[in-house]
Image (spheres, helix red, strand yellow):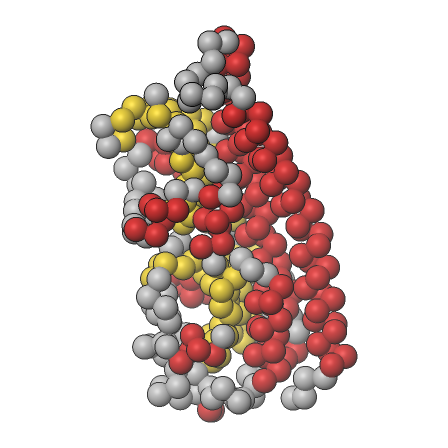
Amino acid sequence: MIYSNGLSSVITLCLLTIIIILSLDIGTVNLKVKFLETATAKVFNNTGGVIQNKTAESTLPADRSLIVKLLADNLENRINKTAAILEITGELPQVKNVSYVSSISSELYGIPKDLDIAKRKVAQDILTFDKDLQLIFFLMPNGDNYIEEPYSRQHNLTVLNFAYRDYYKGAINTGDSYLDNVIISASSGLPISVLAVPLYSPSTNNNTINGNRSNSNTTLLGIWSGGLNLTEFSESLQSLNLTHGERIVYVDQNGQKVADSNKQSFEANHNESFANLQAFKNALRQQKPGSIMEMINGTRMLVFYEPVQFHTTTWAVLLFKPL
């Protein structure tokens, strides 16, 4: 299949439209968070102590709760934006086309670099426009990798079949876009979270049963997936420049750290878990925001929490404030 300049322009316009629409909410959230950062900073004096002003002190928890709420909205918007890009581009004929399936090689962990250029170009366009993604790949219905972009990531793979991954199982079992929890990438050895979108033949029956796509008259063509760039999410939090020992983390449904406002902690301990915190448990069980006092590494902390929902997956935003 020839990938024409005209078709490339259509894809570019499609991606730009999605990003512009969804980035409006994301930009608004970022502006609000920056505003709140400045406002709440006024609660502290220049020496780092709390200003003795009961009105200011009494609004501090409310400010932190609102910041966590805005960050949760921001994270949800970013995930939905990326999912929309994968879902819409997944309907393109060159993405659904798997004419080179016979060329899948266990030595190359997919098809050769110079095959299915049309699909690779779509993946490259997505990566250019959405910096929240670090890679794009396509799996066959049996879980074998078809392509991965950038190709250097495919070249670094050590396994061909990914049917064992939760994102593959989740996309297959729900018949819908699925957000996985943090895993270790097979192509980089670093933490990553995958958004997986199952693609079906045009004869797909879009009826759903108990939230799942009906299997009537459907043919699974493959799974169009993107790996989230967790460093990008951490850098967004680090731009808040939190002070006074405060820290914000995004955690997945297992309590594993996704992103961290503390650059040193993010780089030094990718495997940090918050699964034992009551704040995390409350966020997942109650599915609503709140705050709670907890002892963390010998320090009393006020922990604000807010759940983040994407289909069947729940993540959480946690803000720690030393007391």
Quarter that holds the N terminus: bottom right
Question: Eyeballing the image, is 113 above or below 210?
Answer: below
Q: In which quarter of the view is residue 157 placed?
A: bottom left
Tell me residue 49's x, y (percent).
41, 18
Tell me residue 310's x, y (percent).
52, 48
Question: Eyeballing the image, is 9 above or below 190?
Answer: below
Quarter that holds the C terminus: top left
Q: Is residue 18 left or right of residue 293?
A: right
Counting labels gives 0
Q: In which quarter of the view is residue 192 placed?
A: bottom left
The answer to whether residue 154 is visible is yes
Tell me residue 88's x, y (percent).
65, 65
Residue located farthest toward the left when viewing the structure as drawn: 298
What residue is shown at x 62% (from left), y 34% (from top)? 32
Question: Eyeballing the image, is 30 above or below 147?
Answer: above
Residue located farthest toward the right when viewing the structure as drawn: 6
What residue is shown at x 71% (from left), y 52% (from top)? 21
Question: Eyeballing the image, is 246 above or below 109?
Answer: above
Q: In which quarter of the view is residue 35 placed?
A: top right
Tell me residue 47's x, y (percent).
42, 21
What residue is shown at x 27% (from left), y 31% (from top)? 296
What residue is shown at x 27% (from left), y 26% (from top)? 299
Of residues 242 and 66, which is closer to you in this image?
Answer: 242
Of residues 222 and 206, which is closer to you in this image?
Answer: 222
Q: Is residue 294 left or right of residue 59?
A: left
The answer to whether residue 252 is visible is no
